[in-house]
Structure formats: structure tokens, C-alpha cells
Image: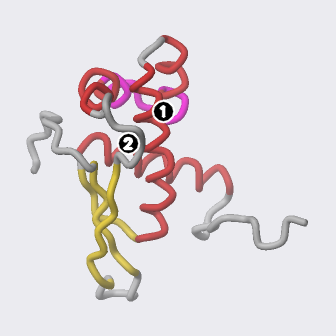
């Protein structure tokens, strides 16, 4: 029986959920840390962890899978050049979620989603 086996819907269609998770992961890999809601962070975390695992493999097929997963070539290049080698000796747990409290407008639980290692991403706005 498959009772209670479906994940959070986030108020979106399946394609929109997939795009939201990819966008959250892309933002995380671009900036190193992002502030978002807890549910979106959990969805994006799964995609980001999978992408970093692909970057550790560092072969052509892994690159193509990462481009399909993230849908952004520039972020994928950065992933394979800087982020993947930084996590080469780690077997999982590439991200962390820190709870920040509730958003003032609607009370949604906010979190800080960040990479578990400090990596120089060349991002100017930090």
C-alpha cells in the first residue's frame, strides 16, 4: 500500500515543483547560502545534494545529468570546477539548514540553506 507516501506539493503543479527545486538549488550553488522557506529548502536541498554528488564523479555523463538537473550551464561549470573538488573527501551532507524563525507577513518558517563548507565562489554580493 502507498498510503501517505507523497511528498509536499508546495501549492504547485509537478512541473512547477521541479522547476522551483532546481531554481533553489541553482541559487544555492551560485551564492553559497540563501534564505527561503523550510519546505522550499527541503525540496532544493535534495537537488543540490544530487548535483554535488554528480560533480564529484566528474565525467561527461555526470556533467550532462547535472545540466539537465539544474538547467543552467554556467552554474554547472562552477559546480564541476570549484564545488565538486571541495567536497571530494566528503560522502554526503553537503548542505545545512539553519532555522531563522517565522516570516513577519504570513508566519511561514524561514531557514538559511547553505553549503556546509566555505568555498570561494567569486560572488560579489556577499
Classify 4 as above or below 86: below
Name which quarter of the figure residue 65 lies in. top right
Q: Are marks 2 and 1 in contact (CB under 8 Å)?
A: yes
* Residue 104 painted magenta: no
Residue appearing at x 67%, y 59% in the figure = 13
Q: Quadrant of the N terminus?
A: bottom right
Span highlighted in magenta in the image: 67-77
Name which quarter of the figure residue 73 lies in. top left
Q: Nearer the viewer, residue 109 or 90?
A: 90
| Disc 2 from disc 1: Cα separation | 8 Å
Residue appearing at x 40%, y 38% in the figure = 91
**Percent x, y of residue 106:** 39, 87
- Give the mark nearer the N terminus: 2 vs 1: 2
The numbered dot on residue 98 is: none
Name which quarter of the figure residue 11 lies in. bottom right
The secondary structure making up most of the magenta span is helix
Say whether residue 20 is left or right of residue 41: right
> What residue does disc 1 label?
71
Classify 54 as above or below 125: above
> What residue does disc 2 label?
26
Residue appearing at x 33%, y 87% in the figure = 105
Say whether residue 86 is left or right of residue 6: left
Say whether residue 38 is left or right of residue 29: right
Q: Nearer the viewer, residue 62 or 90?
A: 90
* Residue 68 painted magenta: yes
**Percent x, y of residue 4:** 77, 72
Residue appearing at x 16%, y 44% in the figure = 118
Q: Mark 1, residues whose alpha carbon is within 10 Å: few (<14), some, or many (≥20)?
A: some
Q: Dot 1: what SS?
A: loop
Q: Dot 2: what SS?
A: helix
Amino acid at each position: 500500500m502507498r498510503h501517505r507516501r507523497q511528498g509536499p506539493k508546495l501549492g504547485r503543479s509537478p512541473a512547477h515543483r521541479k522547476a522551483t527545486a532546481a531554481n533553489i538549488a541553482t541559487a544555492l550553488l551560485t551564492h553559497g547560502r540563501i534564505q527561503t522557506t523550510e519546505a522550499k529548502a527541503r525540496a532544493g536541498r535534495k537537488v543540490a545534494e544530487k548535483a554535488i554528488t554528480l560533480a564529484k564523479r566528474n565525467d561527461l555523463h555526470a556533467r550532462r545529468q547535472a545540466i539537465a538537473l539544474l538547467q543552467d550551464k554556467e552554474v554547472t561549470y562552477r559546480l564541476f570546477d570549484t564545488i565538486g573538488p571541495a567536497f571530494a573527501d566528503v560522502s554526503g551532507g553537503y548542505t545545512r539548514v539553519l532555522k531563522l524563525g517565522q516570516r513577519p507577513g504570513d508566519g511561514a518558517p524561514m531557514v538559511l540553506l547553505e553549503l556546509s563548507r566555505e568555498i570561494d565562489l567569486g560572488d560579489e554580493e556577499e
